[in-house]
């Protein structure tokens, strides 16, 4: 089944259960001081859960564009290294705003996965909140447990702690116990060796969480205390790309038709092959993932910039460019050329991508140009810093110079060092940064008419460095 069809099946299933199909909210959030990006399907319904606004429809379903790169949910470091965490992903969801509760949520989730998707019942595991003995002092979720016992053998029901089975939107806001559904897609041979139950929530790439059913019954107040919500709600979220992986019988989200067109295009443009070398594969997955995050962000109105959400997006794009530069030998802008296939495969479900295609391409190309220049020159200097280092810890002050003079991102320096088995003296970097801030503050205090506004962010645009160009021979960066 193609991904398009899987998406529709989900929405149609809940439409048949009297849910209204609604649009995804924008991935970029402009009016909520507590959240920069949508990180779960429920974000756009927060006010309903809090009881501040009365919903028109009490049953709703959609697919939500999510981004998990900052704050409480930050999966950035996993992306590319594993095969099932993305920066941007779609979260399929169904909601009840004070309408149905645990019984329908659990029964329908099971019906969808086993009847509609025909997933083998013995490969599914469900988890139930075990309760907590901390300040919240919560009971186990006996209601969910009893419901699951009606449909799943007890050997497939597991108990989970607060970290995995109590969902909170942030430090404040609606929350409650949840039941997650995990799927074991290992071969029969592997399953016979080790029980799937022991691999749930264990970072196993073939025993993955697909669906989270959250039963919202509390609100966490600013002082940290829980209070009961005026009405109980259901909030579910299922990873669309993971569901596609299961339904398309593949072992990685990147082998589903959500990603293969992008990966084929990366192979064609960079003249590399996916699936031969783990280092190249990681780079290809990072690029395939990040192009989605950046394109969707731009189409939602958030351009890369030096502050706030724009800075987050700039860093994601630069991370992908760097992976390409280092591992795929891309010395020219190339990411913008992936926008076309992305629009072809996702433009029907998300028309905003298609309508903004030209802008997305232009912005990405421009960013690539300027960052490739920075990379080229900064890497030469970093090489010489490494060559003259006395130990395997690189002086934080030198790293600061690199950042300060070239706008060479500090996380990039740290990444390159770690790839070479070296460390960054982070403390030294922070100290140099602090001193620099102090200097510029006092400079602005002395000459008020002629002061420059300094961005409080780490990042500054590269504007060139003549001395390096004339005095230092530019050596090509080696592949590591
Ligand atoms: P995980 O434990 O795998 O990190 P999670 O518990 O953080 O997932 P939830 O907050 O419960 O995820 O989100 C609901 C669903 O969204 C998950 O069951 C999963 O299928 C999907 N999901 C979560 N994070 C990602 C991600 N970074 N990329 C792709 N899908 C994701
Ligand atoms: Mg997670
Ligand atoms: Mg989880
Ligand atoms: Mg979860």
Image (spheres, helix red, strand yellow):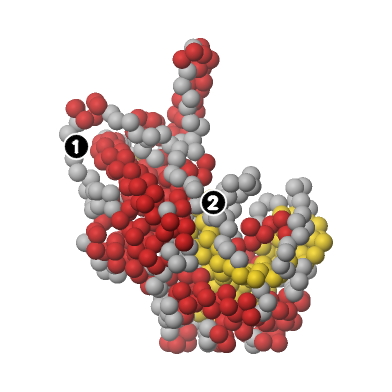
Residues 393 and 119: in front is 119
Q: Check disc 2 and report the residue beneath it.
A: 28
| 81 on left or right of 97 | left
Disc nearest the viewer among 1 and 2: 2
Furthest residue in direction front, as rendered? 355
For image coordinates 55% across by 55% down, the residue present is: 26
Residue at 24%, 63% (x, y): give it.
268
Q: CA distance from mark 1 to mark 2?
A: 39 Å
Identify which residue is drawn at 73% across, 59% down.
48
Q: Position of residue 471 (x, y in %)?
A: 19, 27
Between residue 353 and residue 439, name the one nearer to us.
353
Q: Secondary structure at mark 2?
A: loop
Q: Quadrant of residue 91?
A: bottom right
Looking at the rendering, in which quadrant would you find the N terminus?
A: bottom left
Labels 1 and 2 touching (C-beta < 8 A): no
Question: Which residue is more in the foreground, 381 or 79?
Answer: 79
Label 2 crowd bin: few (<14), some (14–19), many (20+), radius 10 Å: many
Q: Position of residue 431 (x, y in %)?
A: 48, 30
Between discs 1 and 2, the one toward the N terminus: 2
Q: Quadrant of residue 354?
A: bottom left
Secondary structure category for the residue under label 1 = loop
User: Which residue is the site of mark 1?
Assistant: 474
Position of residue 155 in the picture relative to residue 257 (left or right): right
Residue 84 seen in this snapshot:
no
State whether residue 171 appears in this view: yes
Instruction: Return the mark for residue 122.
Output: none
Q: Position of residue 296 (x, y in %)?
A: 46, 56
Q: Is mark 1 within 8 Å of ligand 1?
A: no
């Amino acid at each position: 089944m193609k991904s398009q069809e899987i998406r529709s099946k989900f929405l149609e299933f809940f439409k048949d259960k009297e849910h209204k199909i609604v649009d995804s909210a924008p991935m970029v959030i402009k009016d909520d001081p507590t959240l920069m990006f949508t990180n779960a399907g429920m974000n756009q319904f927060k006010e309903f859960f809090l009881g501040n606004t009365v919903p028109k429809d009490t049953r709703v379903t959609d697919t939500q564009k999510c981004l998990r790169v900052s704050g409480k949910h930050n999966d950035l470091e996993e992306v590319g290294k594993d095969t099932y965490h993305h920066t941007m992903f779609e979260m399929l969801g169904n909601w009840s705003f004070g309408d149905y509760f645990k019984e329908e949520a659990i029964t329908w989730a099971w019906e969808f996965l086993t009847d509609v998707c025909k997933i083998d019942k013995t490969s599914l595991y469900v988890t139930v909140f075990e309760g907590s003995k901390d300040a919240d002092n919560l009971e186990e979720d006996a209601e969910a447990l009893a419901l699951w016992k009606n449909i799943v053998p007890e050997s497939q029901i597991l108990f989970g702690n607060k970290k995995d089975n109590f969902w909170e939107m942030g430090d404040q806001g609606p929350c409650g116990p949840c039941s997650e559904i995990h799927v074991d897609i290992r071969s029969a041979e592997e399953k016979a060796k080790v029980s799937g139950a022991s691999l749930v929530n264990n970072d196993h790439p073939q025993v993955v969480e697909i669906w989270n059913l959250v039963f919202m019954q509390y609100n966490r107040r600013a002082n940290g205390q829980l209070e009961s919500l005026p009405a109980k709600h259901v909030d579910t979220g299922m990873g669309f790309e993971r569901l596609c992986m299961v339904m398309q019988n593949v072992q990685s989200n990147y082998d589903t038709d959500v990603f293969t067109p992008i990966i084929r295009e990366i192979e064609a443009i960079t003249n590399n092959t996916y699936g031969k070398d783990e280092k190249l594969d990681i780079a290809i997955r990072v690029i395939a993932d990040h192009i989605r995050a950046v394109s969707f962000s731009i189409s939602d109105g958030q351009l890369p910039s030096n502050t706030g959400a724009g800075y987050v997006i700039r860093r994601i794009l630069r991370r992908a460019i760097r992976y390409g530069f280092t591992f795929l030998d891309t010395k020219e802008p190339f990411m913008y050329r992936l926008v076309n296939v992305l629009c072809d495969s996702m433009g029907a479900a998300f028309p905003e991508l298609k309508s903004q295609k030209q802008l997305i391409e232009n912005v990405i190309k421009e960013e690539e140009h300027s960052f490739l220049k920075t990379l080229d020159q900064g890497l030469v200097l970093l090489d010489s810093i490494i060559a003259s280092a006395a130990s395997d810890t690189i002086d934080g002050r030198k790293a600061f110079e690199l950042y300060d003079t070239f706008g060479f991102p500090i996380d990039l320096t740290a990444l390159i060092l770690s790839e070479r088995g070296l460390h960054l003296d982070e403390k030294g970097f922070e100290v140099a940064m602090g001193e620099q801030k102090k200097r510029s503050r006092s400079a602005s205090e002395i000459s008020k008419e002629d002061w420059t506004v300094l961005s409080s962010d780490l990042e500054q645009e590269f504007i060139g460095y003549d001395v390096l160009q004339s005095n230092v021979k530019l050596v090509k960066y080696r592949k590591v």
